[in-house]
Image (cartoon, rainbow, N blue to C red):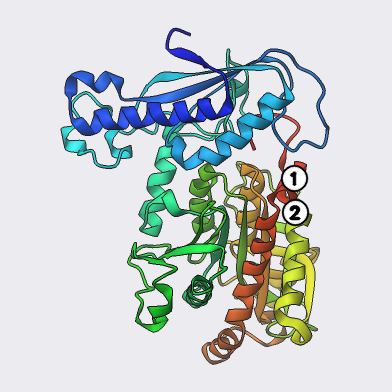
Amino acid sequence: MTDLQRVHSVDEAVRRLIQLYDNSCAIARAGDVEKHSQVLYPKIVVDVLEWRPIDRSEPFGYVDGKGRYSAVISKPHLLRSYLREQLTRLTENYPCEMYVGYSGRRIAPEYISGVDPDNRGELPRPTLDEVNDAIIDGEWEAFHGAEKPLFHFGPQRFDIACARIEHYTGIEVDTVQKYILFTNYAMHTTEFVKFGLRELTKEDSRYTALVLPSGETIHSNDAVLVDVDELMLTSRYQMPRFDLITAGGDGITMINIGVGPSNAKTITDCLAVLRPEAWIMIGHCAGLDGRMRIGDLILGNAYQRKDNILDSKVDPGNPIPAIPEVQRMLEASVLEVYGDENPLMRTGTVLSTDDRNWEWRTSQDLWQWLQHSTAVAVDMESCTLAANGYRYRIPYGTLLSVSDLPLHAVPKLPAGAQAFYSNSKEAHVMCAVRAVEQLAENPDRLRTRKLRRTLGEVPFR
C-alpha cells in the first residue's frame, strides 16, 4: 500500500479522492509530457476488519464477509454525495479502515475537459479493453480476486458513459438530476419546460435553474422574463435533455429518448453510472382490452419482454419485479393531478416489442402471439427500462396512456392521435413530475432490497 494513505473519516476520504483526481487533470491540462505518468485515476480501499450481523432491513452498505474492498473512481465530484452516503453506511455497519491514493491507471485526455488529445504525449488513448459490466452482471472473476469490488463500475466504463451522455443529449453530465423521466415526445418535454419556468418564478420553489438541450441555463431570477414560445427547445442531438435543477441535485431530468428498446438501453447503460434515485417512463401504448378507451392510463406492474434487447444480460424467464414505492406514488399522483376528472387507470402487464408494426399480422398470428399473454398494453421501451433498472439497481416505473386499440378497430392514425396528444400531454407529464417530487422528499422510501440479488452484490447502492 505504498501509494495509499490512511484516511480517518468519510469526509476526508471523499475530499482526498476529488483532490487527487483534480490534480491529475491539472497535470494533463498543463501539457508537461514529463509528468504524464502522474495523470492517474484515484483509488479507495476499505478494509472491513470484522464481519458482524447488521440490521437486516438495510438495503445496502453490507458485505458477506470481512476483507478488502476497493474501487478506482473517475470524476468523484459527480458522486460526492453518493460516495459520502455509501461510505458512511458501510463504516457505521462494520469496523473499517480506509485508504486513498493513486491507482496506477492512467486517464486518457479525451476524458478530461480542456485537454487537447492531439497533444497527448505519453497519455493513453481511450480503449474499450476495460469497459464492461462484469461487476454489474456478477461475473465470477470480478468477485473472486484479492480485492472485492466496492462500486459497480470501473473508471473507463464511467468515463465513456459520461461522454456518451453528452454525445446523445448535447450537454455535459454535471447537471443531470437524481430523478429521471423518459419520454418519446417533444410535446412532453415542452410541457416540462413550461412547468419548470412556472416553478422558477415562485419565491419558495425548490428549483434553482433549468438547463435546455442547447446548453442555455435559465435561472430563477430570469424565468419571469422568458417566453417559452421563443425558446429553442429542439436539438440536433438524438436525445434532447432538460435538467430542472435543485441545490442538492435531487431535481428532475427529462430526456426524449426517441422510439425503441435500443435507444432505451443505450441511454440507461450510460445514466446508470451516475446512480440516479429512480427513472420513470411516461409514454403511450396500445390497449389490448376492448373495454379500454383512448386516454386510459396503464400503471405497469409486470413486464413481458419481447424486445429482445437484454436477453443475454437478464434471462427473459427471470421476472422483473415492480417497485411498490414507485407504484404507490404514481397512483397517488394520478389522483392528485386529475382529481374528479380522473381517467380510468389500471395496473397490469406491459408487453414491450422491438417491432413498431407488431399489429401488422394476420388475425391468426396475433391470436397465437397473445393467446397466453397477461398483457393489457403493448409498447416498445418499458420492459427495457425496467430490466435495465433492475440490472443496475435503480428503481423504475412506467405510466402509459392508451393511444390506440389496434385489436378493436381503433388503430393510431394522424388526426385522432393529434387530438389525443393535445388533450392529455400536460396531465400525463404532471403525474410523473408530482410522483418524483414526492419521492424526493424522502428518498429512503426508494432504498429497496428488491433490487439486491443473492449473489454478485457490491456494498454500494
What is the CA distance from the residue labelled 1 to the residue labelled 2?
8 Å
Nearer to us in this view, 278 or 294? 278
Image quarter of residue 38: top left
Which residue corresponds to the image point at 75% horizontal and 61% vertical from the top-left?
Answer: 327
Residue located at (37% from left, 52% from top): 172
Amino acid type at image mark 2: Ile
Q: Residue 290 or 18: which is nearer the viewer? A: 18
Label 1 residue SS = loop
Q: Residue furthest top?
A: 2
Residue 293 seen by the camera: yes
Q: Is residue 122 left or right of residue 349?
A: left
* Quadrant (top left/top right/bottom left/bottom right) for the C terminus: top right
State yes or no: discs 1 and 2 in contact (Cβ < 8 Å): yes
In front: label 1 or label 2:
1
- Name the residue type under label 1: Thr
The count of marks equals: 2
Q: Which residue is mark 2?
A: 323
- From what the image shows, is residue 302 above or below residue 336? above
Q: Residue 145 placed where, x, y %?
A: 58, 15
Is 247 in front, or is 278?
Answer: 247
Between 339 and 160, the one nearer to me in the picture: 339
Q: Is residue 364 left or right of residue 18?
A: right
Picture coordinates of residue 20, whole percent (x, y) = 39, 26
